[in-house]
Every structure is written in structure tokens, then in C-alpha cells.
């Protein structure tokens, strides 16, 4: 089971979590993130000294192995730190301190840094523990990781007129070609479906679990000959002179592969 | 289970209905009266396909009584060699081949047959058929004992699925304010293998659609834990589980901000 491929250090923190519990007092603030609906929720309590340092820290976490281990680890990392320093501790730092987390866990069960930052924010804003815990957790269960959302496709412009299409006036131009259409909404999906009249090899590539299209288009897409390639992030266009392949990041398996393609359509 | 309308695209709604039903059978192992289910399709030209791998070896499968057109079985589910399956095809039903080539298996699946494994599959089926009624009673007694003890000894524990109309080898629980993957990991440390429908243990990070379809809330599906029993299970295994499980649940609840000795707080 992929999700349990945890490092020994992660498992050790899961088995023997440090600093479990709650804190009380005038000098205490709480950060709550996550939501039981999503399967992860954590509270981090900090006691702040006059010198702006974290004098004590405790946590309570509902969640999977990495949710518990990251909470435990961050309490060890930031105890005694100045608040400004603690704000610089990132999700990546927590994962590194645990000798890494499985890729799929990096963005869903690695909320400890967020909870800590929330606690510091609440401390500075004077938000008391009870009010802090009334605030809703994250609205979306599994946000698309920022790094992925911001990925730029390498060499994109270099292939304009050589396999990259930002608009397509004559669909017959791509007759019998291997076409990959990037999911940019209903228009892209409709174009992909229209293309199936001209070629049997149309892929609609989306970085999400499903194309970002309206329900009606989604139904039509299911019945069409368009192959939907989900959780695929295009990284780079490759080929000698003309487009031959697209380097793709498989977000589910966290692997890279190359997809053969004659045309890549990214509607503007 | 899958409804296939020859020469016609399957309606998404119908397909969706059957997809859900199939998963209920697979995961919760609810025993569904296929006989009743199949009746509305008689004479409509719709072929009903049942994936029976979760039922074989536990429930008698009589193709004379069950109006399915196609039925899939697997070898490893009845302790036969791995990597084999069987497809029952009712007379008169035509199936399109999945592979073309040498024309083996009546042209349906080309490629040299693995004869030794096929013989092994048949032998496993013979052994299973001979011992099944007594074996099923034995497994059910172990399973019932676990359900009884978990519900009696662990506070805020619940059984998922129907108390009686369920496959005899399956016990599927949920525990308030505890996440499933954390339970599975902790039990693994105790040498006990269990599974969960929690999103956190799946590759898609979505909770089990079956449990959601059965009316569980997302937070409840995250707290689900499943045990299955088989030929090598013994009554002592229940004692071993109950040595470990209450402590695992108590430890995780002590960590949880949601557990307040009763139900979890509303999200």
C-alpha cells in the first residue's frame, strides 16, 4: 500500500508522538487547520513568552499516520524558537525532518506548519483559543498543490507552428494525427470531441481528477471517443524541429513519462 | 455488476447505478438477491454481468437460479493459483474478444493457456465446493464473535452494513473520531492486517464511494476499518484482535481533538 511507505522516522513519531495535549492560560494561542470531512484536523497550542519565544507547544490531531507524525515533529522543531523564526518553518522543513513523506501525502497530511502559522497569527491578532477553534478549517479537502498549479510548460512557444496550436480554424488539418488537447474548460473539451470526426487519437489532458468542464459536457465526453488523461501535468514539449513528444508528470504516481503526440492544443 | 446493451451506448445513469451496486457487493459484501435484480432485464436484450469474486467460496452460486448472462470468478479468491480468472457465459450470449491472435479460449482471449494453473484452479474449486457449507459456518462464527466483542467492548463503535444480510467473512466497523489509516498502521505494528475505506489510505485521496453510497458521512468513512476472515482464520484470532484493538482506538482518541467521550463534533 503506497500510502504506508513511510520513513522509519515518520513511523517512530506516529508510534510515540511528542507533546500531545492542550495548553491553557492567558499566554496561549491555538491554530486549527483541516476538517474532519477531509480526514485530517489538527490543533496546535503555543505558549508564548515575554521574549516572543515559543515556551511550550502541544498538539491534538485527528488523521492518518503522516498527519500525526508531522504534528509531533513540528512541536520538536519550533519549541524555544522566536515567533518570526517559527513562521519560516515550512511544510517542506517538516517533511525533511521526517526523512521525507510519500509524495501523495505531501500536500494533504502535511498541515502542521499551517497550523503553527495559524496559531502565531491568532496570537498576534489576539484571537483566543475558543474563537480560534470556531474558525472553519480549510474549505477544500485537497487543494491542488501550488507548485503544480504554477508549472510552466517548457519550450511551449518554441513549437508554435510546429505542433503547438493555440487556436484551430480547420480541424481537418489534424486528420489522423495524434492530438493532445489541454483541458482549459468546456471549449477545449468540445474541440476534442469535434476532433474525433477527423482522427481516432484524441487525448484530453487534465491535471485534475476530471476535466474542469460543465456536467453536460462531462456526460458528452464520457460517450465520446476522446480519451481523458487525468492527473497529468504537461512539463515540456520535445522533438526535433516538430513536436514529437510531451513530457508529462503523473500526479497520482508522482512519476514522469513521455507521451507521443503530433499536435498539442492549448486554447488561449 | 454491469448492464450491457448490445449496439447501444450505456446510459450514464444506469451505468452509474450498476457501478455503485457492484462496489457494494465487492466492499461491504452485502448479499444482494441477484435473482430479483435480474428479473427486470429478462427479455430486454440487456446482458447482466456479475463480478462474483467476493461471493465465491462463501455463497452458493447457481447459474440455473441466478439470471445473469455473464459471471466472473477468480482463482486466488478460493486459494487457487494467482493470476487466473474464469468467465461464465450463458448459452446464446456473444462476447467480443479482448485480444486477437492465436484464437485460444474459443477466440475470446488469445495467448497460450497456463495449463498447470488451470488444473490448480479446478482443484481449488473442488476442495472449496466439498467443504464450503461447514467452512462458511465456521468463518461466520468467528466473524460474529468479533462483531459482538467490538460493539460490546469498544465505546462509540459501529457496524457498517446490514447486521445479518452480509457475506459471512466480513466485519466492517467504524469508530468515532479515529482515522482509518492510523488504525491500520497501528494494527500492522501488532501483526494484524486490516483495511480501511479512508481517503488517506487510497491513491486517489477520496474515501470509499461504496461507504458514501451507503449513506455514511465522509468523516465516518474516514473512520472505517474492515476485517475479513478465511480458511486460515481461527477463533483465537478474535482474542488477538481484541487484545490490540481497544488500546489502538484509545490511543488514537487520546490524540484526537474530536473525541469528547461520545460522538465527534460536527464539522
Image: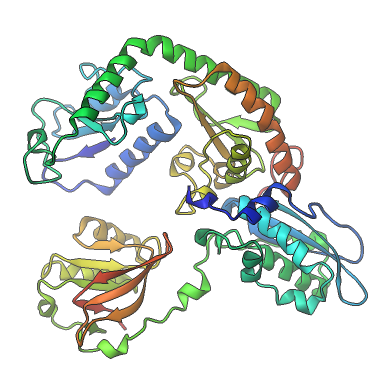
Q: Residue at x 68, y 22 (%)?
A: B152
Q: Give coordinates of residue A93: x percent, y percent.
A: 65, 70
Q: Give coordinates of residue A84: x percent, y percent.
A: 78, 79
Q: Residue at x 70, y 73 (%)?
A: A89
Q: Please state which of residues A245 and B175 is positioned toward the viewer in this rendering.
A: A245
Q: Please state which of residues A126 and B115 is positioned toward the viewer in this rendering.
A: B115
**Side of B6 where A76 appears, left or right:** right
User: Is residue A62 something one can see in this rendering?
Assistant: no
Q: Please state which of residues A12 and A224 is positioned toward the viewer in this rendering.
A: A12
**Side of B83 where A14 appears, left or right:** right
Q: Residue at x 52, y 22 (%)?
A: B163
How is the structure coloured here?
rainbow
**Side of B111 where A8 appears, left or right:** right
Q: Quadrant of the N terminus of chain B?
A: top left
Q: Residue at x 35, y 65 (%)?
A: A211
Q: Give coordinates of residue A39: x percent, y percent.
A: 59, 51
- Looking at the rendering, which quadrant does residue A158 occupy? bottom left
Which residue is most to the front?
Answer: B116
Instruction: Say how many tags the image has.
Output: 0
Q: Is residue A109 above or below residue B197?
A: below
User: Is residue B257 something one can see in this rendering?
Assistant: yes
Q: Give coordinates of residue B109: x percent, y percent.
A: 13, 40
Amino acid at each position: 500500500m503506497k500510502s504506508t511507505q513511510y520513513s522509519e522516522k515518520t513511523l517512530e513519531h506516529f508510534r510515540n508522538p511528542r507533546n500531545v495535549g492542550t495548553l491553557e492560560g492567558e499566554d496561549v494561542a491555538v491554530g486549527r487547520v483541516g476538517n474532519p470531512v477531509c480526514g485530517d484536523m489538527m490543533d496546535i497550542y503555543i505558549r508564548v513568552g515575554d521574549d516572543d519565544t515559543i515556551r511550550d507547544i502541544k498538539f491534538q490531531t485527528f488523521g492518518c499516520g503522516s498527519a500525526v507524525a508531522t504534528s509531533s515533529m513540528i512541536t520538536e522543531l519550533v519549541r524555544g524558537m522566536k515567533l518570526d523564526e517559527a513562521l519560516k518553518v515550512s511544510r517542506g522543513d517538516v517533511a525533511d525532518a521526517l526523512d521525507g513523506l510519500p509524495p501523495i501525502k505531501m500536500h494533504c497530511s502535511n498541515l502542521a506548519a499551517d497550523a503553527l502559522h495559524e496559531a502565531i497569527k491568532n496570537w498576534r491578532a489576539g484571537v483566543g483559543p475558543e474563537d480560534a477553534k470556531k474558525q472553519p478549517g480549510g474549505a477544500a479537502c485537497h487543494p491542488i498543490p501550488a507548485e503544480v498549479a504554477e508549472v510552466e510548460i517548457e519550450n511551449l512557444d518554441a513549437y508554435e507552428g510546429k505542433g503547438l496550436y493555440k487556436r484551430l480554424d480547420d480541424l481537418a488539418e489534424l486528420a489522423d494525427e495524434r492530438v493532445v488537447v489541454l483541458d482549459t474548460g468546456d471549449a477545449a473539451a468540445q474541440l476534442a470531441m469535434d476532433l474525433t470526426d477527423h482522427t481516432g487519437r484524441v487525448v484530453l489532458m487534465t491535471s485534475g481528477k476530471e476535466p474542469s468542464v460543465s456536467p453536460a459536457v462531462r456526460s458528452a465526453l464520457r460517450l465520446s471517443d476522446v480519451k481523458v488523461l487525468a492527473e497529468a501535468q504537461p512539463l515540456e514539449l520535445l522533438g526535433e524541429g516538430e513536436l514529437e513528444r510531451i513530457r508529462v508528470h503523473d500526479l497520482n504516481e508522482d512519476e514522469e513519462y513521455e507521451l507521443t503526440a503530433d499536435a498539442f492544443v492549448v486554447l488561449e | 455488476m454491469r448492464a450491457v446493451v448490445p449496439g447501444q451506448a450505456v446510459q450514464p445513469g444506469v451505468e452509474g447505478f450498476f457501478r455503485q451496486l457492484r462496489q457494494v457487493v465487492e466492499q461491504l459484501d452485502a448479499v444482494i438477491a441477484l435473482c430479483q435484480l435480474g428479473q427486470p432485464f429478462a427479455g430486454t436484450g440487456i446482458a447482466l454481468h456479475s463480478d462474483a469474486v467476493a461471493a465465491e467460496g462463501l455463497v452458493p452460486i447457481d447459474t440455473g437460479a441466478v439470471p445473469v448472462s455473464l459471471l466472473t470468478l477468480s482463482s486466488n479468491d478460493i486459494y487457487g493459483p494467482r493470476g487466473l480468472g474464469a468467465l461464465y457465459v450463458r448459452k446464446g450470449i456473444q462476447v467480443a474478444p479482448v485480444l486477437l491472435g492465436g484464437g485460444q479460449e474459443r477466440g475470446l482471449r488469445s495467448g497460450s493457456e497456463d495449463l498447470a494453473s488451470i488444473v490448480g484452479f479446478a482443484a481449488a474449486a473442488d476442495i472449496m465446493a466439498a467443504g464450503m457449507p461447514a467452512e462458511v459456518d465456521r468463518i461466520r462464527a468467528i466473524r460474529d464473535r468479533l462483531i459482538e466483542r467490538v460493539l460490546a467492548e469498544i465505546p462509540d463503535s459501529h457496524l457498517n452494513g446490514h447486521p445479518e444480510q452480509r457475506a459471512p467473512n466480513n466485519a466492517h466497523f467504524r469508530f468515532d473520531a479515529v482515522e482509518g489509516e492510523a488504525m491500520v498502521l497501528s494494527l500492522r505494528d501488532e501483526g494484524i492486517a486490516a483495511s480501511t475505506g479512508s481517503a488517506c489510505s487510497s491513491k486517489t485521496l477520496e474515501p470509499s464511494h461504496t461507504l458514501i453510497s451507503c449513506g455514511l458521512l465522509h468523516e465516518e468513512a474516514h473512520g472505517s476499518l474492515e476485517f475479513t476472515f478465511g480458511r486460515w482464520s481461527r477463533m483465537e484470532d478474535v482474542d488477538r484482535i481484541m487484545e490490540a484493538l481497544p488500546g489502538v482506538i484509545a490511543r488514537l482518541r487520546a490524540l484526537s481533538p474530536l473525541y469528547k467521550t461520545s460522538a465527534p463534533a460536527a464539522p
